[in-house]
Image (spheres, coloured by chain):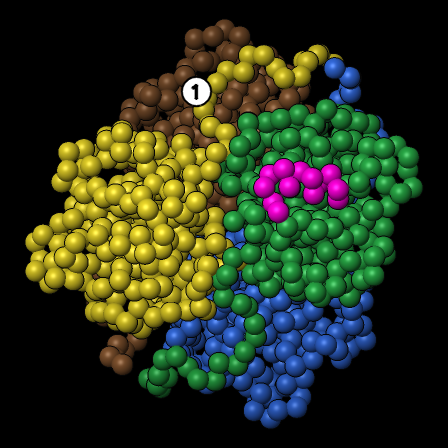
Chain colours: A blue, B green, C brown, D yellow
Amino acid sequence: MTEQIRVTVWNEYRHEKSNAEIAALYPEGIHGAIGEGLRAHGFEHVQYATQDQPEHGLSEEVLAQTDVLLWWGHMAHGEVADEVVERVAARVLDGMGLIVLHSAHYSKIFKRLMGTSCDLKWRELGERERVWVVNPAHPIAEGLPDSFVIPQHEMYGEPFGIPEPDSLVFVSWFQGGEVFRGGCCYYRGRGKVFYFSPGHETYPVYYQSEIRQIIANGVKWAAPTEGPRIFVANRKEPLEPITTS
Amino acid sequence: MTEQIRVTVWNEYRHEKSNAEIAALYPEGIHGAIGEGLRAHGFEHVQYATQDQPEHGLSEEVLAQTDVLLWWGHMAHGEVADEVVERVAARVLDGMGLIVLHSAHYSKIFKRLMGTSCDLKWRELGERERVWVVNPAHPIAEGLPDSFVIPQHEMYGEPFGIPEPDSLVFVSWFQGGEVFRGGCCYYRGRGKVFYFSPGHETYPVYYQSEIRQIIANGVKWAAPTEGPRIFVANRKEPLEPITTS
Amino acid sequence: MTEQIRVTVWNEYRHEKSNAEIAALYPEGIHGAIGEGLRAHGFEHVQYATQDQPEHGLSEEVLAQTDVLLWWGHMAHGEVADEVVERVAARVLDGMGLIVLHSAHYSKIFKRLMGTSCDLKWRELGERERVWVVNPAHPIAEGLPDSFVIPQHEMYGEPFGIPEPDSLVFVSWFQGGEVFRGGCCYYRGRGKVFYFSPGHETYPVYYQSEIRQIIANGVKWAAPTEGPRIFVANRKEPLEPITTS
Amino acid sequence: MTEQIRVTVWNEYRHEKSNAEIAALYPEGIHGAIGEGLRAHGFEHVQYATQDQPEHGLSEEVLAQTDVLLWWGHMAHGEVADEVVERVAARVLDGMGLIVLHSAHYSKIFKRLMGTSCDLKWRELGERERVWVVNPAHPIAEGLPDSFVIPQHEMYGEPFGIPEPDSLVFVSWFQGGEVFRGGCCYYRGRGKVFYFSPGHETYPVYYQSEIRQIIANGVKWAAPTEGPRIFVANRKEPLEPITTS
């Protein structure tokens, strides 16, 4: 089944082109590192889309052939066309999985689907992060220990302006004193959304084995299932007889 | 405390002006019937706002002095200015309670805060609805029996395109064969949202005692509490010393 | 993967031996009908256990080799040994999936894992039940329409004394006026529990295609995933240096 | 309303009698310090019950006159009579609020109502704990800042063997590298349960203003509301006519 899931990794892809250190860290782009990790976990259909492509690489055709979309963005959220955001939202609500990564907490698509500010506190000192599993029964915790370390990372801290997750899978500890709900699952319409906080552009987070495991788990969890569609309709004909009593 | 909650009942107020039967049913407008019910439950600060007022009656000043906003709309959702919708959303995320009634499931403000389609199935045959309590511990179930009847109502049916409620309090049974999650609580930012499905304009629903009880309960539950604000900030100074290991 | 899941269908197996009509309906026992449905859905490792076997057929060995346990009981809940209940509970909390069917809402194992009364209202008139999907994104809704009919069934009605489900997938409508949260998912420890209400012994419910689809979906959802174990321990050695400030 | 809530603070009350340092810290017992904090927050009906009293101080009469019960226990969980545990559980399921404090995560009553192991990791080095608000909209977060410090405390760490909370209000950060879901709300039957992790017997936690604020908030939230009772019954008479189609 993993082999058959069609994954599109979307990346803003700006930092890698404008900053030499980030380019050195992610020579194939952040999307390339994420895609490499997915292939190593058995995904055979992984393609890329980036912000500066026509329609941000997310045409109707691309989305129609995507089971799970991963989204990394940071410095150019405002440049993403509203029309494309609505197109992606419609596909998620119709069943496509969406994995929202790190600074994409502030992307238009995440705020659109959450309905909240998605505000948080942050700090760039390269401090240690410890990611803790708080729901060991959830399939996204598959293959993980109690906790693992990201040696250096940007701090993201509470209160985080999100709806209460339908399942909270990970909570992060930061050396500087904060905690963060960094692994959050949501059902939205007929689709599933997983927000996962690790992945700052200046650290090799997407090469780390636990991170790759979690992203692979997330894609499997978010893959579409064929429940009934949700739509508005006038059900003029009652299913059962209506009588006045 | 009830006495002190400042309530604004917002109504589209179009049906009552264009349809003689509805005008006869709600001579003071739907908002007037809701407000009357709240006063009977001890609320002393109840004011009204309607769609055709300047800024839809929802200026910054009005919202700043509103603890809980009730919202009834149906035929003119599209005419509500986006700017006002964003203003209301910002106030809810900052703490104001919001009670979304009946056909306002399709209002801009509800869709904005839910992030989903809010689609549902509907039928206007005036069939019987039975409202069942499914979370008897919730304060919005205060004073209610297991179930009660709305003698004639519009059917609203599943699947309803909403996020899973943070608490599901009521589920409705319809004579024609459908069920509906008609009483749904959400935390959104620093605020609380309660969606309550009864209240079609052609039936005297807002005069019914159980409905008035539930709306009063909902306003009390949704009244602001003074938790910390949520905002974005660079916390440059760590709370704890950061050392390299 | 489906092929590899090791399923044990547990049945009280008393009605079928004492009532000729039920015996005629379920000549291989209720467990036999459920197992047949699972095999038709591609499960290759399906075994049975029944209450009157030694240790109720649930020895440590059997449980150790069970990925998902289905539980049907009704007239003899009180005769299930507490020791076996604790054994099953421990296995669920350690990762085994549990599917609790119909009248097993009152089984010792379900009450043990829920912590609530699991009370409900009931009526045996063979009325019509309509099962509605309320979370189309959930994998247990796979392959289902908006709703389907059980032509004749026992009524189960709210308020149902369960914890709020971690996901509510199905809500039933009954001809006599009630609704019921009949498809409820729970995480418990490292394991998953799915309560599914259809399946009264006097109707051919477990031969119905939608029911078989849902049970197959439920088993797949509840199959163990390898998250971290949960146990008590004194973590004398801190992960990070502890300094007095 | 606060004035009218009848609170019973239950304490094991053993450490204070056997350890001079703890006795010096809590000369009126842990229950005395908690009760003092409640009175300072306007509660006028605060009484005490302790483990070594007849029936552990929790007769039917005492429970019948208790709106919210607080529970602190640690070294003698096993000595609490099962009969009393069942009595308390029945009262909670019928509407009484329950506040479970610190090491009472392992009390019989909490495990009984949760259905899980309630296992956790712990360490007694007197490290710093930071309590973060993660749901600012919840009434239990009333009056609190983003976070506050407990200067020295026992570490409690994840994974914590509890059901996913119906609302997660607080998450703690520990100096030694752990996080903990230390403020968890549950609906159970007709009652409400709040688990709050701070309060080790060797530190003056229950004299701290934020802790007292949270406990007062918790009692108000958990106070009974008069929803319908939950009980089993044969509803022989259908509410709606049952016809064969």
Which residues are the magenta region? B31-44
**Secondary structure under badge 1?**
loop
Q: Is residue B236 above or below residue C8?
A: below
Query: Which residue is disc 1 drawn over?
Result: C74
Which residue is rendered at x = 28% and y = 26% of the image?
Answer: C81
Q: Residue C121, position in %: x, y? A: 51, 22
**Residue type, label 1:** His
Q: Residue D213, position in %: x, y? A: 37, 59
In magenta stretch: residue C45: no
Total number of numbered discs in the rendering = 1
In magenta stretch: residue B33: yes
Q: Residue C69, position in %: x, y? A: 43, 35
Direction top: furthest residue: C20
Chain of the residue where label 1 is placed in the rendered structure: C
Other residues around mark 1 within 10 Å, as few (<14) / some (14–19) / many (≥20) = many
Which residue is rendered at x = 60% and y = 19% of the image?
Answer: C153
Q: Residue B135, position in %: x, y? A: 52, 37
Query: Which corner quadrant holds the C terminus of chain C?
Result: bottom left
- Determine if residue A148 is in view: no
